Amino acid sequence: MMKIMEVFEEKAYLVGVERKGDTDNLFSIEESLKELAQLAETAGLMVVGSTYQKLTSPNPRTYIGSGKVAEIKSAIHALGVETVIFDDELSAGQLRNLEKTFGGDVRVCDRTALILDIFNQRAATHEAALQVALAQMEYQLPRLTKMWTHLERQAGGKVKGMGEKQIEVDKRILRTQIGVLKKELESVRKHRKQYRNRRFSVPVPVVSLVGYTNAGKSTLLNRLTGADVLTENQLFATLDPTTRRVQMKNGREFLLTDTVGFIQKLPTTLVAAFRATLEEISESSLLVHVVDISHPLAKQQIDAVDKVLSELDVSSIPKLMVWNKFDRVSDPQMVKLEAEKREDVVCISALSGEGLDEFCNAVQEKLKDSMVWVEALVPFDKGELLSTIHQVGMVERTEYTEDGTLVKAYVPLRFARLLTPMRQMCIS
């Protein structure tokens, strides 16, 4: 049975370019190609080989040099390759020229198209499907020329003008579809905002999980909340944000949101399309950056996540770093000692549950930074208000008086506003 499956698995060949003097890339070319192989496998392809070239600047016609093109063409025939994947984004002209050179049966795509394809496979909700469709259309728009070469071939190259007209028609259709999708996404975004506003009327702090794809965010959410969020040892196992309530042993609560995983060279069209989803992050009381500390490229992954976060303008939100999978490293004790030396770092194993009590305590301490100190007198007939203060805040002291309960506590700013009418009765 396995042999039959292998016959039908599409064979892929990977190509990378290392730019001489380029200091922007966080990952080495070997590391980046290794990750590209993981992406290809996640998309259901079988990687049969790879190559890379060092260049001062990419070739405008074929991205790589003519010698490397010939080498890849030989590999295509020798290995039966059906798809050639480039590690960087290619222009319409480069895609067209490479497909002509490699032959009509070979598909050429780039890292962006591959990530979009994975997102398309994994979009589980209407919103995610809309976002992926928009990103794919905006990616395709400048690359449509290669799709219409069959019109020229049909009449021996004499109907070039007709082909160009067809391209323009298709671009108009695509632009119209993009406009429709943007309107629909705007409607979804407004609905999400209304839902968020309703959620914020109950002043439970919101904690967002961010991190590199496959760092263990969904596993952590499942472990803390009993949620049934898909977790797989694959890149981009989940796309849609999931929010669940976490109740700690001391009775306090917070909302935990799992967001889409980040990756280096994340396509700009995708970041733009998923901005509505990423807005969840900007509305948070706390960001928890989950890191797979057992990964050999943990440092580079941290930098890649920080790079995306800097684009989202969330620098004012308090952050807590979580070193997940610390039990998988060669010396867990040394990693724990290293974490203790730093501020804002907690070691956990989301899979086994180790360190989760420390994590919850650290979250509570961090949330205090986004809270305000209040001293309020709560009337006896407002018992539910007192209960909410205990749930969402950090109560330092309570005193019972003739007029009600005097509470001294840290509470979320939104909740402090609800207590404003009583502040006249506050005792300093």
Image (cartoon, rainbow, N blue to C red):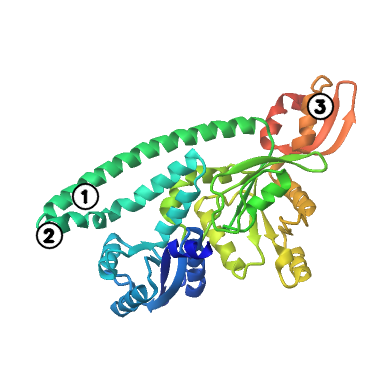
Query: Mark 1 vs mark 3: which is more N-terminal?
Result: 1
The image quarter in which residue 347 lies: bottom right
Q: Position of residue 414 (x, y in %)?
A: 66, 34
Q: Nearer the viewer, residue 325 or 322?
A: 325
Query: Mark 2 vs mark 1: which is more N-terminal?
Result: 2
Q: Which residue in the structure is indicated by mark 1?
A: 167
Q: Position of residue 62 (x, y in %)?
A: 29, 70
- Can residue 333 be spotted in the picture? yes
Q: Nearer the viewer, residue 309 or 142?
A: 142
Q: Residue at x 37, y 62 (%)?
A: 109
Query: Which amino acid type corresponds to the residue marked 1 in the rendered image?
Result: Ile
Q: Which residue in the structure is indicated by mark 3?
A: 377
Q: Which residue in the structure is indicated by mark 2?
A: 157
Eyeballing the image, is 19 above or below 99?
below
The image quarter in which residue 91 lies: bottom left
Query: Which amino acid type corresponds to the residue marked 2 in the rendered image?
Result: Gly
Specify few, some or many for label 1: CA neighbours under 10 Å numbering under 14, 14-19, or 20 or more. some
